[in-house]
Amino acid sequence: MIFTAVFWWAGRGRGDFGALFGSRPDERQAAVDQRATAVAGLAVAMFCLVATVVSLARGGSGNPWAALDCLFAVVYVAGLVIFRR
């Protein structure tokens, strides 16, 4: 409930955050949002890769991290194919 109120309040502003949270970004703000989303995705992917290696080094199976790594790879390749056009 608190997060909803914060996003609602941030969406009312006139700055970058207001435009992004209020679903009315201009081209520059949309590009900033896209880059931030890409960085967040790469950070999660790197975390999953490191967690897989740590799990395997400790003698585990690497799951669920290996499955998330595979999912990331499939979605990444699909994105390359789709956005290449």
Image (cartoon, grey):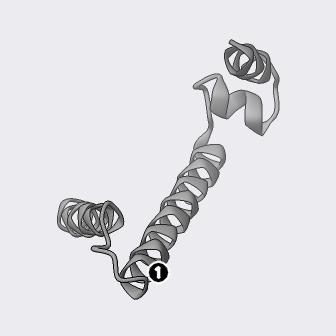
Q: Quadrant of residue 73?
A: bottom left
Q: Amino acid at mark 1?
A: Val
The residue positioned 19% from the left and 62% from the top of the image is 78
Q: Is residue 70 left or right of residue 39?
A: left
The residue positioned 39% from the left and 75% from the top of the image is 52
What percent of the width, then of the height, locates residue 4?
Answer: 67, 16
What percent of the width, then of the height, locates residue 35?
Answer: 57, 59
From the viewer's perspective, is residue 83 above or below residue 58?
Answer: above
The residue positioned 64% from the left and 49% from the top of the image is 28
From the viewer's perspective, is residue 36 above or below residue 51?
Answer: above
Q: Residue furthest front?
A: 59
Q: Quadrant of residue 80?
A: bottom left
Q: Nearer the viewer, residue 16 or 9?
A: 9
Task: Bin the neighbour count of mark 1 within 10 Å (Cα to Cα): few under 14, some 14-19, many 20 and up.
Answer: some
Q: Label 1's element?
A: helix
The residue positioned 43% from the left and 82% from the top of the image is 58
What percent of the width, then of the height, locates residue 13?
Answer: 82, 22
Q: Residue furthest bottom?
A: 57
Q: Quadrant of residue 66?
A: bottom left
Q: Nearer the viewer, residue 27 or 66?
A: 66
Look at the image and tell me in which quarter the N terminus lies: top right
**Residue beneath disc 1:** 54
Q: Is residue 24 left or right of residue 54?
A: right
